Amino acid sequence: MLITVDCGTTNMRLRLYRSDADCNIISAPLDETKYKTGVRDAVRVHSDNVLKETLALGIREILERNSLTESDIEAVVCSGTLSSHVGIYHIHHVVMPTALCDTAAHSELVRMPEVCGIPILFIPGVKGTGDIMHTEVMSGEECELYGIADRMGIDGAFTLLLPGSYNKIISVNGNGEIELICSSISGELTAAVSENTLLRRAVPSPVIRVIIPEMLKWGAEFASEWGLSPAMSKVWVLQRLGKDQDEAGNFLMGAILEGDMRLMSALPKDQPVYVGGSSPLRELFLEMLDIYGIKATGVDPEVARIAPNIGAVKVYREYKKQHGLI
């Protein structure tokens, strides 16, 4: 059996899976637990102890709830920010182009007695270097991509869009290598503007309750012509034009995501596009892409939910192969 850990800026999620002798997951998650603890907390208190304590607590909870002991678990497989410089075991990001085998080659299987007695695999993130446009980092999204590609049967070159607080647009070449990452903070920007400015009264909470394509398009076109800040200033004016909060929210999101759509122009045009993430962000981005004439496929919701774990376990299996353990 395996325990997977996906840790980000604000949350840590652990899941229990049954696996076979070749480290293939052969069950849906048997159990899971989530904590509102991430590397942001470690940065705030200038100590990684909060991360180690949360990880140890999560492992103990899963073992106790399922009447298991540490000897029943082959490994704890960690993707995301726990291997970052603000995590609990720093591994330098792998420089693109990066395939799954490269990620596995840079992963490290260690013992951490202060957390548990089970071997822990730490998986590094991926980074790009060069000019400002191509200097990017991601931690965890690479495993999400590996998992989505596996479960969706994606072979060859493709583009994956992962919406969230920090949106990632990732291009994979025909050799299965991550070769380009584009990022935006559209999610964070939406939260900041809708919760901490006068626009709070003009848009609903959450900002998108229903998707209104014509308002998304209007917001994107206005931002493209006049800029994002002027577009946002028009959101509260919409009520004077007879528009309701949902229409204003869609106008705002169209304006904010116009920049993300522009990022798509930096990626190859001749490869399929997939959109992961959860609802309603997945549907929102699919609609925006359609407005811009980009055909895309939404990732199955259940695949999107467990993709980081599927990808992380694939990395673990490759790590074992490279070290002659299977």
Image (tube, rainbow, N blue to C red):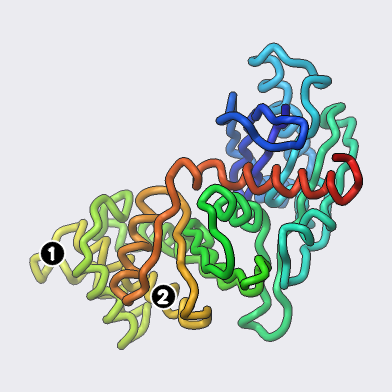
Q: Amino acid at mark 2?
A: Met
Q: Earlier in the sequence, mark 2 or mark 1?
A: 1
Quarter of the image for residue 16 reads top right
**265 and 251: which is toward the camera:** 265
Residue under numbered circle 1 = 243
Residue found at x 78% / y 49%: 318
Which label belongs to residue 317?
none
**289 over 222 or under it: above or below:** above
Q: Residues within 10 Å of mark 1 (few under 14, many from 20)?
A: some
Residue found at x 44% / y 73%: 260
The N terminus appears in which quarter of the rendering? top right
Q: Residue 284: horizontal and vertical position, in percent? A: 34, 59
Q: Residue 279: horizontal and vertical position, in percent? A: 38, 48
Q: Residue 206: horizontal and vertical position, in percent? A: 32, 50
Q: Residue 129: horizontal and vertical position, in percent? A: 73, 78
Which label belongs to residue 261?
2
**139 and 264: which is toward the camera:** 264
Marks 2 and 1, how far apart in space?
Answer: 25 Å
For residue 302, side relative to residue 294 (left or right): right
**158 and 33: which is toward the camera:** 158
Q: Nearer the viewer, mark 2 or mark 1?
A: 2
For residue 201, side relative to residue 182 (left or right): left
Residue found at x 33% / y 65%: 253
Q: Residues within 10 Å of mark 2 (few under 14, many from 20)?
A: some
